[in-house]
Amino acid sequence: MPSLQAITQRKDALIGYVKSCDTGAGFALTPGGSEPKVEHTFQALYILEVFNELGDIDEESLIEFVNNCKNVDYGFGNTEGADSDIYSTYYACWIFDLFNVEMYNYTYEWVIACQNGSAGFGEKINESEYLYPTYYGLEALTINGTDLSDNDVSVWLLERQNTNPSSDDYGGFATDGNSSNMWSTWAAIGSLSRLDNISQVLTEPLVSWINSSQNLNVYEDDYGAFSRKPIESDYCLHYTYTAIYSLRKLGTTYLSRINLGAALDWLLNLQNDDGGFRTKSADSDSSLSLTYYAFSILNLLGERGRLDTDVPWEYGFELPLWLWFLIGVAIVLTAILLIKKYYID
């Protein structure tokens, strides 16, 4: 029978939230979710592995779930029966590697088949190349130990940077090389870093483009957060993650050019009282995916210690669902008895 657990620190609340998304096989997007996904399973395991909290995982059931997401082409879908895609296939490779389970050679051949010649990777075989799936393709092949030194994809990646000084998107990355955005920039920088070719990037215009995406208005709720690009105001956790990741990969010195303190303060304020994280300051629900990105920022910066602090909300005991159910039943029965007594009297 579950016991009451006192939650007093941010870290404990975060770990508790992640574990509550466990379905018994894989992990769901939110607590109580019925459909596990390979993506969310990866995100949960990434966090739990860092905190050395994998002991409660049913490894056999989890691996069985992931393996059931494998298709006849040896690629993996996000759920059982879903089409193969390069993201889910990378997550599956990472999970198998975490638990020392040998991945199928045909799976890595499937990943290689997603590359279009010497250009980038598509989300699936015979699909157009984009920056985002290229990052995941390279990461999957790295797990396999594939030698990427002779891969001409670096040339293709560098050609995706906007090199037009008169453009508002000057310095950023996009698949078309013009309409720069933070996710594409994240994928390009991550890929070039993996290929050891990040030194060939036009760094100064890129850093300026990223820095201009930060909200520096102290009177706004999302002060410190980043947007999709400088001209936008869609500040949220995803773009803050991609911005900080890119600057960190370019070099730690570039982090001093942003208001990192404001970004981290904003980030910590996104933690809800269920232990998970939301996407922006305005009230919204937690999700495992958002919690993963929040934790990834702290982990990337070596700032996990910020979670070793007391939760800012009033803490006490975390009641399991079964106990809430019993409390609800007791309230209803008490109300019925009081009503009967009132009418009888």
Image: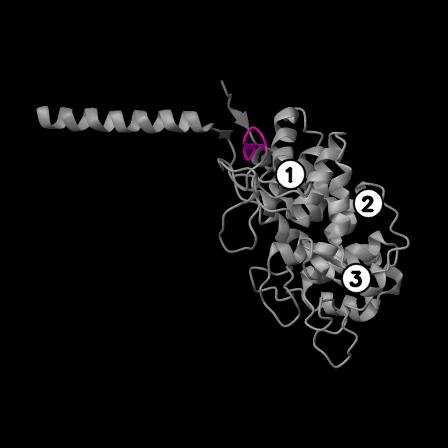
Dot 2: element: helix
Q: Residues within 10 Å of mark 3 (few under 14, many from 20)?
A: some
Residue of label 2: 142
Three-letter code for the amino acid on which mark 1 is drawn: Lys
- By secondary structure, the bulk of the magenta-drawn segment is best described as loop
Quarter of the image containing the C terminus?
Answer: top left
The residue closer to the viewer here, 3 or 74, is 74
The residue closer to the viewer here, 236 or 119, is 119
Q: Is residue 69 magenta?
A: no
Dot 1: element: loop
Question: How far separated are the C-alphas under marks 1 and 3?
Answer: 26 Å
Residue 135 spot, x, y in % from top left: 75, 54
Q: Can residue 139 be seen in the rendering of this structure?
A: yes
Q: Is residue 23 magenta?
A: yes
Is 193 on the left or on the right of 92, as rendered?
Answer: right
Residue of label 1: 70
The mark lying in front, picked from 2 and 1, is 1
The residue closer to the viewer here, 107 or 131, is 107
Asked which quadrant contains residue 233, the reply is bottom right
Is 263 on the left or on the right of 207, as rendered?
Answer: left
Residue stretch rendered in magenta on the structure: 19-25
Three-letter code for the amino acid on which mark 2 is drawn: Thr
**Disc 3 + disc 2, Cβ < 8 Å:** no
Q: Earlier in the sequence, mark 3 or mark 2?
A: 3
Residue lying farthest to the right in this orientation: 150
Residue 2 spot, x, y in % from top left: 50, 21
Instruction: Tell me, for residue 148, which label it has, or none.
Output: none
Residue of label 3: 119
